Amino acid sequence: MQKAPRGKANEAASDPLMGIVVELLDTEGYEAVQLREVARRARMSLSTIYKRYPTRDELIIAALECWLTANRYADLAPPIDATLYSGLVHIFRKVFEPWETHPELLKSYFRALSGPGGERLRKLGFEAVTPAARDVLAQADPGFARDLEGILTSLVYGVLGQLSTNAIDVTDILPSIERAVYWLVGVRS
């Protein structure tokens, strides 16, 4: 098993193949995941990899699912007495602060969302975030909560799109979202 350098994104991956793919995504980006290179690093044949993952996209999605499950979706529930603003900001911080140390991995994640199998990643994220967000949004008018959910979802996809084209830095994401939440919820919080 090839061990990643300390602090790399794949520390929690128990499958060495997943760890190698996550490390490539995190350090070199999406295009760096070439199956011959993965096989070489994993010291396994291409046919073994293809038996487990019929396509490169399947391998990338599986590696991202593994990493997300181990690293991203914990502790999302905001404090019980959270206002609308503080509750939403808490959730966004829990989701995005760790990505700040893994910008290439976040870009790879965003790219994978729009490819084959991306719906699996989207579903994983929504299943983790939705309960906490709905708890926070329960204090708002239902119509406003639905609108806010749609606006914030579009905002997140927008800033991720800007990150993927290098129009913004990864550290610009959270402040942008926090400002938008502030202006959207106003005195409601």
Image (cartoon, rainbow, N blue to C red):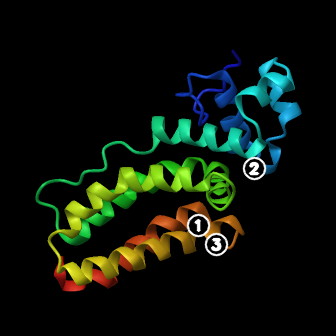
Residue 162: assigned label? 3
Residue drawn at point x = 46 percent, y = 49 percent: 124
Q: Nearer the viewer, residue 107 or 153?
A: 153
Residue drawn at point x = 29 percent, y = 65 percent: 88
**Disc 2: which residue:** 30
Q: Is 167 left, or right, of 186 in this rendering?
A: right
Q: Helix or strand or loop: what does disc 3 sit on?
A: helix
How far is disc 2 from disc 3 in space, using C-alphas? 16 Å
How far is disc 3 from disc 1 in space, using C-alphas? 5 Å
Label 2 vs 3, first from the N-terminus: 2
Quarter of the figure with residue 163: bottom right
How far is disc 1 from disc 2 in space, using C-alphas? 15 Å
Q: How crowded is mark 3: few (under 14 residues within 10 Å), some or many (20 or more)?
A: some
Quarter of the figure with residue 148: bottom left
Query: Can I make out residue 168 in this image?
Result: no
Q: Look at the image and tell me in which quarter the N terminus lies.
A: top right
Q: Helix or strand or loop: what does disc 2 sit on?
A: helix
Look at label 2 and name its amino acid. Answer: Tyr
Q: Look at the image and tell me in which quarter the C terminus lies.
A: bottom left
Residue 87 % position (x, y) = 24, 63
Query: Can I make out residue 41 in this image?
Result: yes
Q: Which of 97 and 149 is in front in this view?
A: 149
Look at label 3 and name its amino acid. Answer: Gln
Residue 162 % position (x, y) = 64, 72
Residue drawn at point x = 25 percent, y = 51 percent: 77
Residue 166 % position (x, y) = 71, 68
Look at label 1 and name its amino acid. Answer: Leu
Marks 3,1: beta carbons within 8 A: yes
Residue 160: assigned label? 1
